[in-house]
Image: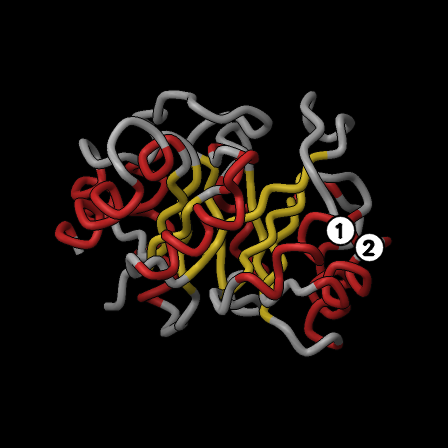
Amino acid sequence: MKYILAPSLLAADFTRLGEQIKETEEAGAEYLHIDVMDGVFVPSISFGMPLIESIRPASNQLFDVHLMIVDPERYIEEFVRCGADSITFHLEATKDPQAVIDKIHACGIRAGISIKPGTPLEEVYPYADKVEMVLLMSVEPGFGGQTFIPESYERIRQLRNYIEENGLATRIEVDGGVGKKNIREVIAAGADVFVAGSGVFRKNSITDNINKFLEAF
C-alpha cells in the first residue's frame, strides 16, 4: 500500500505561502490539502477559489480540495477551473451525494466523500465504490490544531475492512490531529492518505517534519 502525506494549508504561514508550498513539494509531499470553509457548514471561514488559482502555478502537487461548505454542487466547476485535482465534499452537506460525485467526475477529476466523527460509518458505505477516496474526520471539522479523537482508530479499521471485503481500491484519508506521535497507529488502523497541518508547518523546519512522516511510511 502506498502512503501519501497531504500537508494542510490551514497551518501554513501565509506571509511565506509560495515558499512553504515549494518546500513541501521538494521534501516529498505528493498532495496539498486545501480546506475550504464557508462559515455555515462549519463555524470558520477559510479561503476559496482565488487562493487556489493563485497558488496553482507554484506547485505540481495534487491539489486535494476539501469542501466544508453547504450545497457543494454549486461550485464544483469553478474549483476545477481554478486548479483542483480532487474534490472531497461532506455527506452531511448535500441532499444528493451521488449527484455531487457525478458532477465531480464529469469535470474529469477525482471525487472524495467525507463524514464527521459523529456520523455513523455505515452512511458512507453506499458511496465507497463510487469515489476514489473516503475522508474520515478525526476531529470536528472547522478548526486546525485539534487533538485526534481516539475512537477514530476503530472507524478507520472498520472502513478498511469494508473496502477490502468488497474488493475496492478506495483510499482512506484521515484529517485531524495526525502528527508524528500517532502516525504509525493511524497507518496500522488502515489509512493511506494523511492530512497534517501543525505537524508539517509548525516547530521544526517543514523539510524535517515531512521527513519524519515519510520515515514512518
Q: Position of residue 28 (x, y in %)?
A: 30, 61
First along the sequence among labels 1 and 2: 1
Vertical relation: 150 (above or below) 199: above
Residue at the far right in the pictured view: 74
The answer to whether 145 is drawn above or below residue 100 in the figure is above
Label 1 SS: helix
- Work out which quarter of the rendered image holds the C terminus and state it: bottom left
Q: Which mark is residue 58?
A: none
Q: Pick out the residue farthest to the left.
A: 215
Quadrant for the N terminus, please.
bottom left
Q: Quadrant of residue 109?
A: bottom right
Side of 50 relative to 90 (left or right): right
Of 160 and 32, the residue lying toward us: 32
- Tag 2: residue type? Tyr
Q: Report the amino acid beneath label 1.
A: Met
| Residue bearing mark 1 | 49
Residue lying at 44% horizontally and 59% vertically, measured from the top left: 31
Residue at screen point 68% across, 27% down: 42
What distance separates the C-alpha of mark 1 from that of mark 2? 9 Å
Residue 151 or residue 109, whichever sits in front: 109
Residue 97: x and y, percent? 72, 55
Q: Which mark is residue 75?
A: 2
- Disc 1 crowd rating (10 Å Cα; few below 14, some 14-19, many 20+) is some
- The foreground one among 121 and 55 is 55
Instruction: Classify mark 2: helix, strand or loop.
Output: loop
What residue is at 41 percent from the left and 46 percent from the top? 7
Q: Nearer the viewer, mark 1 or mark 2?
A: 1
Q: Residue at x 55, y 41 (%)?
A: 115
- Vertical order, 217 against 176 (above or below): below
Type of colouring: secondary structure
